[in-house]
Image (spheres, rainbow, N blue to C red):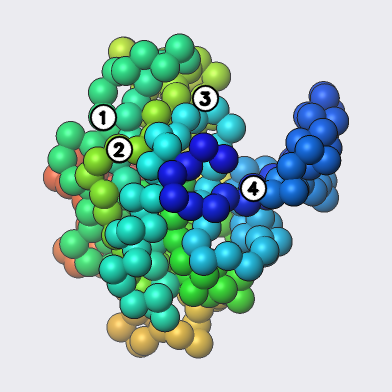
Amino acid sequence: YAQKDVTVRILVRDDGSSDATQSILTHNQESCDRFSWYTNGHLGSAASFLDLIKAAPEADYYALCDQDDVWDDDKLKCAVEMLAQNDQKKPLLYYSNLRVVDADLEFYRNAHSRPWVMKNKYSALADVAATGCTMVFNRTLLELLRSHMPAEVKMHDEWIFLVCSFFGNVVYDFEPHISYRQHGNNVLGTHLDGMTPAWIRQKIDRTHASSWLPRSVNAKSFERAFTDMLSEKDKKKIRKMADYKGSLVSRMALLTDLGIHGRSIKTDLKYRIKIITGKQ
């Protein structure tokens, strides 16, 4: 609650924990009228955050919060000030740089050495610039997300970024307002010196797992969820990503589409290698 110039309410979803978590949550709920929690079984990370979006109470703005990061006291204030400069009738999404720290909060580096922004909405099919723990968005975007829930999505922050890239305005803050804690047990994230063993295993497992095709899965879900709002040009671009593994012709069509690309030369190269190897 130690955020400047904003009133904060916290909603927690417990993903089926078996330790003392629920007792701690109940204690917090009883001692603070701006804290509440619920549980409805194990869903996993992405589905848990989307379920929170469905359950979220009325507010002007919403932020996603992971359990092991540390926010600056002006994190929400800075986000709201930037979002407030835009038309609130449109879906709006804010994201920022991150201050990467170790388990003891010792500074390592900023995650973005230069601005991480997309040049066009179709690039959101190939890459994601926003990290979920930095996201703040308005009620218009929440209502759009809530009314068009995906059948399947690999990561919630990629989904939110994709939706707002197509239908709203995305606002970027190069200044970090969060200490992004990285340690040996991170499920997802960046890396510190030499890359952690968990991070390396994660990348290897995903590269070789046929079930981990985040961009093509997201594209299929996106077209199904928003078919009533997409132009024919949009659908054609989305289907290139969704169906690229169907044939060599389909794969080449996506590979040679320069309108769908990564946010940088490095990420674009990785993206096109994944198309060639069928891992996109």
Q: Residues within 10 Å of mark 1 (few under 14, many from 20)?
A: some
Identified at 79% across, 48% down, the residue is 38
In 3D space, how far apart are the residues under numbered discs 1 and 4 (Cα atoms)? 27 Å
Q: How crowded is mark 4: few (under 14 residues within 10 Å), some or many (20 or more)?
A: some
- Return the residue at label 2: 176
- Return the residue at label 1: 110
Q: Name the residue type under label 4.
A: Ile
Is disc 4 in contact with disc 2, using a CB cutoff of under 8 Å?
no
Q: What element carries label 1?
A: strand
- Return the residue at label 4: 10
Is disc 1 in contact with disc 2, using a CB cutoff of under 8 Å?
yes
Q: Residues within 10 Å of mark 3 (few under 14, many from 20)?
A: some
Q: Name the residue type under label 2.
A: Pro
- 1 vs 4, front mark: 4
In 3D space, how far apart are the residues under numbered discs 3 and 2 (Cα atoms)? 20 Å
Identified at 44% across, 24% down, the residue is 181
In 3D space, how far apart are the residues under numbered discs 4 and 2 (Cα atoms)? 22 Å
Residue 163 visible in the displayed image: yes
Q: Position of residue 1 (x, y in %)?
A: 57, 40
Foreground residue, 148 or 65?
Answer: 65
For residue 186, the mark is 3
In 3D space, how far apart are the residues under numbered discs 1 and 3 (Cα atoms)? 18 Å
Q: Which of marks 1 and 4 is nearer the N terminus?
A: 4
- Say which quarter of the image contains residue 4: top left
Q: Name the residue type under label 1.
A: Asn
In 3D space, how far apart are the residues under numbered discs 1 and 2 (Cα atoms)? 7 Å
Foreground residue, 183 or 268?
Answer: 183
Identified at 40% across, 34% down, the residue is 72
Is disc 3 in contact with disc 4, using a CB cutoff of under 8 Å?
no
Q: Is mark 4 on a helix, strand or loop?
A: strand
